[in-house]
Each structure stands twice: as structure tokens, then as C-alpha cells.
């Protein structure tokens, strides 16, 4: 399978990329990046790095590079951004522009009865109820919830060729962590390699659930 990845320079995105490189079911990877990447990523024949000038626009050369891809794992963005305007642009506008471009490009290719799967990395704090008052990080959590709502709605409108999945992990821990501190023990958590493994599995095989909470991710990884 050919897959599209974003956020590959981040903590979670790099783990996703590493596991995709090792996965025999994934034959080709298109990494969409804001900047050029360095070896060993660029020296791997399985990876094609496409530098994006604007994540709102997908010109013909970019669409040609992603042609034939059957899934995208979207790990772009971070919890702390300069302001709400930037947060909305990165979290909502970039994501929706991508899923629309990928789905339309997929429809233009002879893929038969196949589906395009879009796996989105959200977070445990995302709030889909836009009217609900929140004590902590209200704006950011509402923005994350809004993009979840719009992704699921877009997928529903474009069944059965498009499937969207929402990942809502809690605290994402490094692979090396073996002892949970008191802080980590107070809330849900998952190791980064387990999270990446589940996201890749969803891209390859799909799932009955569209939204996976932290417990769902941990249980899915064990199967």
C-alpha cells in the first residue's frame, strides 16, 4: 500500500514513519513536509519527501506524487500554538483541505472498490460539543473537537469511498519509559510505539470504530 504521512519530524510522526518503513505491507510513503528532510529519511527508496509551500493548496505536481495512495496518517500540529487563529488554520483548515484533496484525487484514479482511509491524530482532551464550557484549554479543545466533527461529517457524506478515523490518545510516552511517575499515573497514557502501531493498522485495515479513545488504542494494540 502507498500511504501519505504528515508531521514526520515530530515525536509521534517520526515513530509512525519508522514503523511504516519497517512494515512490509507498506510499499511507498509520501511524506508531506514544510521543509526538506535529511538522511537517513531521504536516502530510503521507500520514501518520497514533498515540500509543501502551503498546506491549504495541493497543486498538480503534489497530486501526481500522491496518486495511488490509499491512506493518510495525519500527525501535523501541536498542542501549543501562538494564537487561536494559527491553531484553527493548522488544526481545521489544513486538515480539511487535505482530506478533500486526497479524496478527490483518489476518486480520479481507477482504484476499483477500494477505500481511502484518513487517520487523524487528535487528543483525549478534544471536545466535540462546541457549547460546552471547559476549565482548561477551552479554545484549543473546542478547535480539536470541531475538526473531529467536520472530518466525520465529510466522511459520512462521501461513503463508501472514504473512511475517517480519530485517534484520541492521552499522555504519549516515549518507548523507553518503563516506570510511570505519579504525574503519568493520574491520567490515561500510551507509549508512542503502541500509538503508531495502531494508527498504521487502521490505515491498512480500517476498524468498526471511527473514534478510538486512549483505552481503545491500548486494547487494539494488544490484539
Image (cartoon, rainbow, N blue to C red):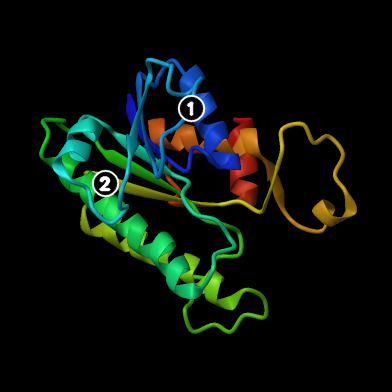
Query: Which residue is found at the position 49% from the left and 22% from the top?
Result: 39
Q: Is residue 146 visible?
A: no
Identify the residue at horizontal 28%, vertical 33% (top origin).
70
Instruction: For mark 2, give the secondary structure.
Output: strand
- Quarter assignment of residue 51: top left
Instruction: Bin the neighbour count of mark 1 within 10 Å (Cα to Cα): few under 14, some 14-19, many 20 and up.
Output: few
Location of the N terminus by quadrant is top left
**Residue placed most toward the observer, 220 or 127:** 127
Is residue 3 left or right of 91 when viewed as pictured?
A: left
Q: Nearer the viewer, mark 1 or mark 2?
A: 1
Q: Position of residue 18 (x, y in %)?
A: 53, 26
Left/right placement of residue 165 relative to residue 58 reads: right
Horizontal and vertical percent position of residue 121: 49, 50
| N-terminal label among 1 and 2 | 1
- C-alpha span from label 1 to label 2: 33 Å
Which residue corresponds to the image point at 52% horizontal and 33% vertical from the top-left?
A: 16
In this picture, is 129 found above or below 101? Answer: below
The label number, if any, that marks residue 38 in the structure image: 1
Q: Is residue 51 above or below residue 94?
A: above
Q: Counting other residues with Cα less than 10 Å from the Cα at mark 2, is it few (<14), some (14-19), or many (20 or more)? A: many
Read off the residue under disc 2: 162
Q: Identify the residue at horizontal 47%, vertical 70% (top origin).
A: 143
User: Quadrant location of the C terminus?
Assistant: top right
Residue 93 locus on image (x, y percent): 34, 63
> Secondary structure beneath disc 1?
loop
Splitting the image into 4 quarters, where does residue 91 fall?
bottom left
Query: Is 20 located above or below residue 134 in the figure?
Result: above
Amino acid at each position: 500500500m502507498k500511504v501519505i504521512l504528515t508531521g514526520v519530524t515530530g515525536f509521534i510522526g517520526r515513530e509512525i514513519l519508522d514503523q511504516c518503513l519497517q512494515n512490509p505491507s507498506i510499499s511507498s510513503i509520501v511524506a508531506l513536509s514544510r521543509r526538506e528532510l535529511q538522511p537517513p529519511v531521504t536516502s530510503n527508496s521507500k520514501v518520497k519527501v514533498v515540500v509543501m509551500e502551503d498546506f491549504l493548496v495541493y497543486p498538480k505536481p503534489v497530486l501526481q506524487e500522491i496518486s495511488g495512495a490509499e491512506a493518510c496518517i495525519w500527525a501535523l500540529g501541536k498542542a501549543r500554538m501562538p494564537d487561536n487563529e494559527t491553531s484553527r488554520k493548522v488544526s481545521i483548515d489544513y486538515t480539511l483541505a487535505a482530506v478533500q484533496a486526497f479524496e478527490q484525487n483518489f476518486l480520479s484514479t481507477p482504484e476499483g472498490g477500494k477505500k481511502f482511509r484518513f487517520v487523524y491524530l487528535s487528543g483525549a482532551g478534544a471536545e466535540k460539543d462546541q457549547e460546552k464550557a471547559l476549565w482548561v484549554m477551552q479554545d484549543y479543545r473546542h478547535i480539536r473537537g470541531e475538526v473531529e466533527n467536520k472530518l466525520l461529517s465529510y466522511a459520512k457524506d462521501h461513503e463508501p469511498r472514504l473512511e475517517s478515523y480519530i485517534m484520541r490518545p492521552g499522555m504519549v510516552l516515549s518507548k523507553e519509559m518503563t516506570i510511570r511517575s505519579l504525574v503519568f499515573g493520574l491520567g490515561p497514557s500510551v507509549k508512542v510505539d503502541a500509538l503508531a502501531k495502531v494508527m498504521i493498522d487502521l490505515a491498512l485495515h480500517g476498524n468498526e470504530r471511527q473514534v478510538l479513545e486512549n483505552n481503545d488504542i491500548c486494547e487494539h494494540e494488544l490484539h
